[in-house]
Image (tube, rainbow, N blue to C red):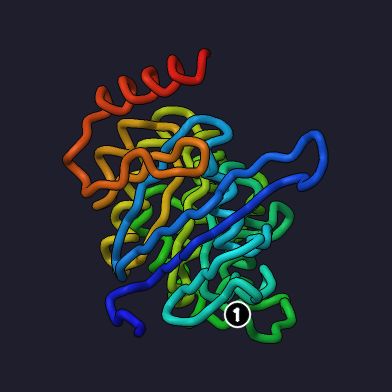
């Protein structure tokens, strides 16, 4: 029976890489996860814990070997990645991946505005839409509304990531995925992009899954915390139950258990 408050459901997921070879590695054996509508889940874990695999399974760049994945009440585990992109927004670690460097800010926004619809990029954008884009950019506080004819490749990493975040949430989506989206930024830009992220998620009521290496961000943002280790949840708790220091201690305990 469908739960009206449930936005994401992963049930009994199994994923093995290089099966039958000497390099066989099982990341998820029987993994399940649910996100309610409006949840903002922060995911942490060491390298190889399953964080990136989790995102790729949701976005469709990797198929699950077994199990079911639903978003917005519909099964998506057999949907191709480009079909899922219509209702799943993803912001990557590399600021260059969410935008087209050679196109202007205005052209990037026009393309995003027409996601999922046939569109020919023409030399001019309707003035009304240009004014709407300017109004979207102004609250970012980065002055991009006055630079709409600049090529995106000339922007700083922080500006470009802020633009990628805005683009990923311009059209209605069921799920926003943030894939280490501040990791490549300098500390000041990282703080700016996280503050912007928090505001956009709150204003739009977005169901969000954020993978981060920044333990402070993991405990300060969102309403839930998930810590993965070898494809299993060692922490799955509401925000506020763990401090960054708790997570550092837990990381240390796991490392000792693994003989590192």
* Along the viewing direction, whichever of 259 and 4 lies nearer the viewer: 259
Q: Residue furthest front?
A: 20
Q: Is residue 110 visible?
A: no
Depicted 159 relative to depicted 217: above or below: below
Q: Residues within 10 Å of mark 1 (few under 14, many from 20)?
A: few
Q: Residue at x 31, y 20 (%)?
A: 249
As drawn, is 19 to the left or to the right of 221? right
Q: Residue at x 50, y 34 (%)?
A: 183
Task: Give coordinates of residue 37: x percent, y percent.
Answer: 31, 70
Task: Give coordinates of residue 163: x percent, y percent.
Answer: 51, 55
- Res. 83 image quadrant: bottom right
Task: Give coordinates of residue 184: x percent, y percent.
Answer: 55, 34
Q: Which residue is mark 1?
A: 114
Depicted 191 relative to depicted 249: above or below: below
* Along the viewing direction, whichever of 72 and 140 lies nearer the viewer: 72
The number of numbered discs placed on residues in the rendered structure image is 1
Depicted 103 relative to depicted 95: above or below: below
| Quadrant holding the N terminus | bottom left
As drawn, is 109 to the left or to the right of 7? right
Q: Residue furthest right?
A: 21
Q: Is residue 75 visible?
A: yes
Quick one: SS at disc 1? loop
Task: Give coordinates of residue 175: x percent, y percent.
Answer: 44, 67
* Along the viewing direction, whichever of 238 and 182 lies nearer the viewer: 238
Q: Residue at x 60, y 80 (%)?
A: 114
């Amino acid at each position: 029976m469908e739960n009206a408050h449930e936005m994401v459901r992963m049930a009994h997921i199994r994923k093995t890489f290089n099966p039958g070879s000497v390099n066989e590695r099982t990341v998820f054996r029987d993994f399940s996860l649910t996100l309610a509508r409006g949840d903002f889940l922060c995911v942490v874990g060491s390298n190889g814990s399953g964080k990136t695999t989790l995102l790729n399974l949701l976005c469709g760049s990797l198929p699950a070997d077994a199990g079911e994945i639903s978003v917005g009440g519909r099964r998506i585990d057999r949907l191709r990645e480009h079909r899922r992109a219509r209702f799943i927004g993803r912001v990557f670690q590399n600021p260059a991946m969410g935008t087209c460097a050679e196109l202007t800010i205005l052209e990037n926004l026009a393309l995003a505005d027409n996601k999922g619809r046939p569109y020919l990029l023409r030399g001019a954008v309707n003035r009304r839409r240009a004014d709407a884009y300017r109004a979207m950019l102004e609250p970012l506080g980065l002055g991009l509304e006055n630079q709409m004819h600049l090529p995106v490749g000339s922007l700083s990493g922080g500006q470009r990531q802020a633009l990628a975040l805005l683009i990923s949430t311009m059209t209605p989506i069921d799920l926003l995925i943030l894939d280490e989206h501040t990791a490549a930024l300098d500390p000041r830009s990282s703080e700016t992009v996280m503050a912007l992220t928090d505001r956009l998620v709150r204003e739009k009521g977005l169901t969000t899954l954020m993978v981060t290496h920044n333990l402070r961000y993991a405990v300060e943002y969102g309403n839930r915390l998930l810590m993965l280790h070898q494809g299993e949840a060692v922490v799955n708790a509401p925000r506020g139950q763990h401090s960054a220091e708790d997570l550092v201690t837990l990381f240390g305990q796991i490392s000792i258990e693994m003989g590192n």
